[in-house]
Image: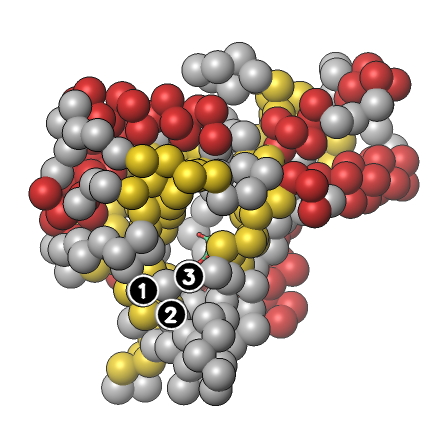
């Protein structure tokens, strides 16, 4: 196994140093990183220089990679490597723009949410003083669950929420009519609001502002009040880590135990160019 050092990032997350991912990792190192993800929920590597093949090779050490429905925004020759970017070339976007600018969990609208996501920063926008822009916010949904009152734990313990992809995209299309043309999914899923992690069994508060606006069997007004309370709780600073990007950062996270949100505080000519892989 390759040895590495680990340093905490905040209430969740660790930075791992001492591994050059471009050289590949062995099975024992992959298992150790999976344990770390399970425990710390977000894992960061700085200073990586990764070809698409190396990025994909690393991801496949952790699980089965899954292409995005918008295949035209994949890296050439790598359908499972999604480009997320505001960069335009010859008047055309080179990747999906404005992705994930709300609190969400990847694939929570699927019967089985994605297990991990990897996000690799190639170009990071910054302001005139060199301060990076386009941060990604993370929260720990397991820590948020643990901190709920016993009464609230009891109330939500048997409830099921509806996670809807179309709900989010109909909101986005109000702001940008081009988005709907890009939406190919009609998925909805029902998930317990207290979701047991498939590996650790640890309970997470599994409702996100991005995809959830209904609770099964509950009148809409009551559901809105309860969800608003839970979203406010999830987003408390004590459960959060804000990642300030540098080019060469690779960050990966456990989707069941966390939520994330991309901060849209930049615009061209400030360029953001990221590569993303989801793992089942
Ligand atoms: C996402 O994958 O949802 C977007 C995250 C980001 O680009 O910061």
CB-based contact (under 8 Å), mark 2 and mark 1: yes
Q: Evaluate whether residue 160 shows in this view.
A: no
Would you say 78 lies left or right of 69 here? left
For label 3, the residue is 245
* Quadrant of the rendering where the C terminus is positioned: top left
User: Disc 2 on helix, strand or loop?
Assistant: loop
Q: Evaluate whether residue 2 shows in this view.
A: yes
x 38%, y 70%: residue: 124
Percent coordinates x, y for residue 130 in the rendering: 44, 79
For label 2, the residue is 124
Q: Nearer the viewer, residue 26 or 178?
A: 26
Percent coordinates x, y for residue 172 in the rendering: 60, 63
Tell me: residue 45, above or below residue 34: below
Which mark sits nearer the N-terminus, 2 or 1? Answer: 2
Percent coordinates x, y for residue 28 in the rendering: 19, 20
Q: Nearer the viewer, residue 66 or 11?
A: 11
x 65%, y 60%: residue: 171
Q: Nearer the viewer, residue 57 or 8?
A: 8
CB-based contact (under 8 Å), mark 1 and mark 3: yes
- Identify the coloring: secondary structure
x 29%, y 43%: residue: 17
Marks 2 and 3 sit apart, C-alpha to C-alpha, by: 7 Å
Tell me: residue 75, above or below residue 272: above
Would you say 50 lies left or right of 248 here? left
x 16%, y 23%: residue: 1
Q: Quadrant of residue 51?
A: bottom left
CB-based contact (under 8 Å), mark 2 and mark 3: yes
For label 1, the residue is 247
Mark 3 C-beta to ligand 1 under 8 Å: yes
Q: Quadrant of residue 30?
A: top left
Marks 2 and 1 sit apart, C-alpha to C-alpha, by: 6 Å
């Amino acid at each position: 196994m390759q040895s590495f050092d680990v340093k905490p990032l905040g209430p969740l997350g660790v930075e791992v140093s001492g591994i050059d991912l471009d050289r590949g990792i062995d099975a024992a190192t992959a298992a150790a990183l999976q344990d770390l993800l399970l425990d710390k929920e977000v894992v960061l590597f700085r200073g990586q220089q990764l070809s698409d093949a190396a990025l994909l090779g690393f991801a496949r050490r952790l699980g089965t990679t899954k292409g995005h429905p918008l295949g035209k925004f994949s890296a050439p020759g790598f359908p499972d490597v999604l480009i997320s970017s505001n960069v335009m070339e010859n008047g055309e976007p080179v990747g999906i723009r404005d992705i994930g600018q709300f609190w969400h969990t990847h694939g929570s609208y699927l019967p089985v949410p994605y297990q991990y996501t990897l996000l690799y920063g190639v170009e990071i926008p910054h302001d005139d003083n060199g301060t990076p822009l386009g941060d990604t916010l993370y929260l720990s949904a397991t820590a948020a669950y643990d901190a709920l009152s016993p009464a609230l734990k009891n109330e939500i313990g048997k409830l099921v929420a509806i996670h809807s992809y179309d709900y989010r995209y109909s909101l986005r299309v109000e702001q940008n009519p081009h988005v709907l043309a890009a939406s190919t999914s009609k998925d909805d899923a029902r998930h317990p609001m207290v979701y047991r992690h498939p590996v650790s069994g640890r309970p997470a508060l599994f409702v996100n502002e991005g995809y959830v606006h209904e609770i099964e069997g509950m009148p809409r007004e009551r559901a809105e009040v309860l969800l608003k309370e839970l979203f406010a709780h999830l987003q408390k600073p004590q459960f959060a880590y804000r990642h300030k990007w540098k080019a060469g950062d690779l960050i990966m996270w456990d989707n069941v135990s966390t939520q994330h949100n991309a901060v849209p505080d930049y615009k061209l000519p400030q360029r953001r160019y990221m590569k993303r892989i989801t793992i089942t």
